[in-house]
Image (cartoon, rainbow, N blue to C red):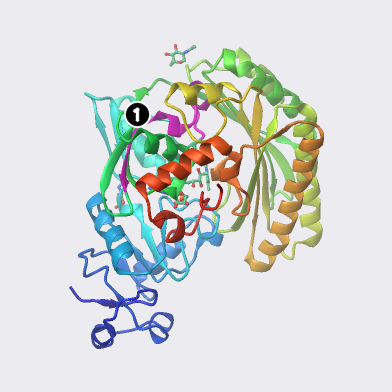
Amino acid sequence: MRPIYLGCFFIARTAVAFETFEEPSQQAGLTTPDICIIQRAGIPNVYFPGDTTYLERVQSYWSLTSQLTPECFVLPRDSGEVSVLVRTLVEETQCQFAIRGGGHSSTAGANNIENGVTIDLSLLNSTTYDPVTGLASIGPGSRWLNVYRTLDPLGVGVTGGRIGIVGVGGLLTGGGCSLFLYRQGFACDNVHSFEVVLADGKIITSSSEENADLYQALKGGSSNFGIVTRFDMKTFPTSPIWSASQVHPESASQAHIAAIKKWIDDVQGYQNSSAIVFWSYRPALKETIIISGLADLSGTANPPILQDLLAIPGTQAEGYRNIWFTLTLKNDEKTLAKAVELHSKLVEDMKADSSDGDFETQCFFQPLPAVIGQHGRERGGNMLGIDTQEENAVILLGSLAVNGLDQEALGRAKMLAWKDDLERYSLESNTYMPYRYMNYADGSQDVVAGYGKENVLKMLAVSRTYDPDGVFQRRVPGGFKILGKE
Ligand SMILES: Cc1cc2nc3c(=O)[nH]c(=O)nc-3n(C[C@H](O)[C@H](O)[C@H](O)COP(=O)(O)OP(=O)(O)OC[C@H]3O[C@@H](n4cnc5c(N)ncnc54)[C@H](O)[C@@H]3O)c2cc1C
Ligand SMILES: *[C@@H]1O[C@H](CO)[C@@H](O)[C@H](O)[C@H]1NC(C)=O
Ligand SMILES: *[C@@H]1O[C@H](CO)[C@@H](O)[C@H](O)[C@H]1NC(C)=O
């Protein structure tokens, strides 16, 4: 097959490259004359700057912060192609690469790369169900809506994302908060087995019976050990779900804080319940509103456990540059109120300093009662470090969406100040918790350290066993890495 010219490669076939490459892109060719050998490896879906598909892939990332421009996107069609691709990149090039599932992380460099190759798993998007094993096999490039569309008619469900467009690969390797979180733990705790392509191209399965150390490490370990090419998830029979979404003015803040605090303390006794609450500044309204998403998995309308939230008389827009951070806080009313107060301050600051006034925020409370850690432990354990958590807690997602690099820099400084102030407050009030939910974290946050020393050591051991040369540490530089954490 025709070799293609590519900047980051390091193979002495320069002459061939110059002869055969028709339209070298500005950046790719002129400095380092190397050859792309991917096509030689027999993988057809490789897209370069200038290709229509390349542009479409760049634009397919949810947050503009992730719309980086790699040397090329490669879209393997099956795990065999992922295997050949990894082996080729590792053995025959010096190239760095990134792994992309659904592309919803806003952390620049986690799911895309400059001066490297992006392995885009979008075509690994099938969902099948085996009634004999009761397992659903789901590709890492799928979107949850498509997963549900396939499984719903078959009468089975899985613990997946709450918003249809979100991707599978990142959500399931980072943790995963679903409607079933309180009944069944994190989404990753409901994975029966992972099919993984290792750095040497080997395709292996990891489950509680086979490569069990890797199985545990992948539940929270993200892209540190290999590329997951299939998730076999446990299913459960579907049944009607009751749900309600409510919107309130900011003046109802105190009532929401008290109600969600109480719900978190009660949910262990009624795990068929789900609730999230968030404060959000909306540019179209020019004000902050409070949104609550409530559900009952047994289909009971207006269940008693949700009475407080129900008695207090929408999704985020795409196309912005998104800045997210996370903290975990003990379930304490004063601390939750502090988070809301600091969010209002951020909104006021942004109103004063934003150049276009077009920004959107969230102060999102994702409950983390202690029972979730128990569910994880009962399902074989994960890396999150919450299985010994005794107190109920809340994962806070702070998010800000802005336009342009200037506004991103301005906004990031304000967001990090919000995080630092709240972190300090929680330390002083003894409501601090070390866990950081990877899928809500800013790239500057040390998610891996938050998993705790014991889990870090476990992950380092798994890395040494399955990836002895540290390919997924050094050659896949983006995301939350375990390297250097010992
Ligand atoms: C609108 C919106 C709604 C959301 N709703 C929820 C929700 O309901 N619950 C929740 O828990 N989170 C939610 N999130 C957060 C979400 O979990 C993360 O953004 C997650 O990373 C999305 O997965 P993805 O496949 O799109 O990730 P990507 O951005 O593609 O990847 C994220 C990270 O995972 C790694 N990765 C991806 N696939 C693989 C793989 N196959 N093998 C190895 N590593 C891989 C990537 O390298 C990268 O480091 C939401 C996000 C958005 C933007
Ligand atoms: C998988 O992705 C392809 C290419 O984008 C798309 O045509 C197809 O409909 C997707 N399949 C599913 C099940 O989502
Ligand atoms: C939760 O809901 C499911 C589905 O309706 C039901 O089978 C189960 O018994 C319920 N559990 C409890 C504790 O109510």
Coordinates of residue 245 in the picture (x, y in percent): 59, 31
Ligand 3 shows up in the quarter that is: top left
Which is more toward the observer, 211 or 157? Answer: 211
Residue under circle 1?
208
Coordinates of residue 125 in the picture (x, y in percent): 31, 47
Label 1 sits on what residue type? Answer: Ser
Coordinates of residue 121 in the picture (x, y in percent): 35, 53
**Considering only vertical position in the picture, is 140 above or below 5?**
above
Q: Which residue is drawn at 29% across and 64% down?
A: 91
Q: In which quarter of the image is the N terminus?
A: bottom left
| Residue 223 left/right relative to 22 | right
| Residue 321 left/right relative to 155 | right
Ligand 1 neighbours mark 1 (CB distance < 8 Å): no
**Considering only vertical position in the picture, is 436 above or below 113?**
above
The answer to which quarter of the image holds residue 462 is top left
- Is there any visible trace of residue 350 in the rendered image? yes
Q: What stretch is highlighted in magenta?
A: 177-197
Q: Does the magenta stretch include residue 478?
A: no
